Image (cartoon, rainbow, N blue to C red):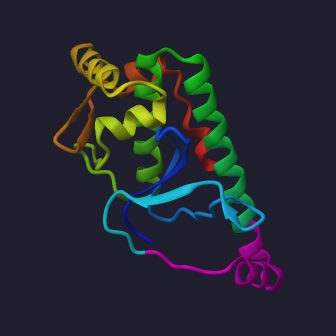
Amino acid sequence: ESGWGCISHDLAGGQRQILDFALKGDIVRPQTYSGTALETFVAQTDLAVLEASTKTLALGAAKSPYIASLFLETLARQRAIVAQHLTNVGRRSALARTAHLLLELRARLERVGTVSRTGYACPLTQYDLADALGLTPVHVNRMLRELRERGFLEFRQGHVRVLDRQGVTKFAEFDDRYIDG
């Protein structure tokens, strides 16, 4: 319902790969295998959530075609977002993937009405961004500085401001259509 969460896969050596960030309106369903959680969900901010069992959700979907279609749209959108994240980590430069993620977060927040004229509040640390982007925190710091120096965007004191939307969108090859499912 509100707030930010982080969905990650934790490795035995203490490292983590952030798979996605849960934002207002997202449906979060951590993956399990034989009753064991494969993912971790951590609140990044205070959260307001609505919890429902898989059985309750399935019953709701069975009774309402509208609810069923919402679930299907959500699953398609989440799959598209994960595909973009995989492309970012696997094939985009560190600078482009950093810009792409910050543009994606802006687009997702814009759809739920939490982006202002000057940008958006972002509670993520450089460590969080590093774990989502497959970079070190030092490298993320350099990428944020370079994005600012190029006049693309600025991330300061928990606030992201897009300075040149057209330029950074082209540079990062960002097309927000995948967010709509």
* Residue drawn at 50 percent across, 65 percent down: 25
- x then y, percent, for residue 71: 71, 66
Q: For the stretch drawn in magenta, what is the main secondary structure?
A: helix
Q: Is residue 86 left or right of residue 141?
A: right
Q: Is residue 18 left or right of residue 156?
A: right
In reply to whether residue 59 is colored magenta, the answer given is: yes
- x then y, percent, for residue 136: 37, 25
The residue lying furthest to the left in this view is: 157
Q: Is residue 47 left or right of residue 68?
A: left
Magenta part of the chain: 49-69
Toward the viewer: 92 or 18? Answer: 18
Q: Is residue 20 above or below residue 129?
A: below
* Residue drawn at 71 percent across, 56 percent down: 75
Q: Quadrant of the N terminus?
A: bottom left
Quarter-wise, where is residue 36 in the image?
bottom right
Q: Is residue 114 left or right of residue 82?
A: left
- x then y, percent, for residue 76: 72, 51
The residue lying furthest to the front in this view is: 13
* Residue drawn at 46 percent across, 75 percent down: 49
Whether residue 87 is visible to the viewer of this picture, yes or no, is yes
Q: Is residue 59 above or below residue 140?
A: below
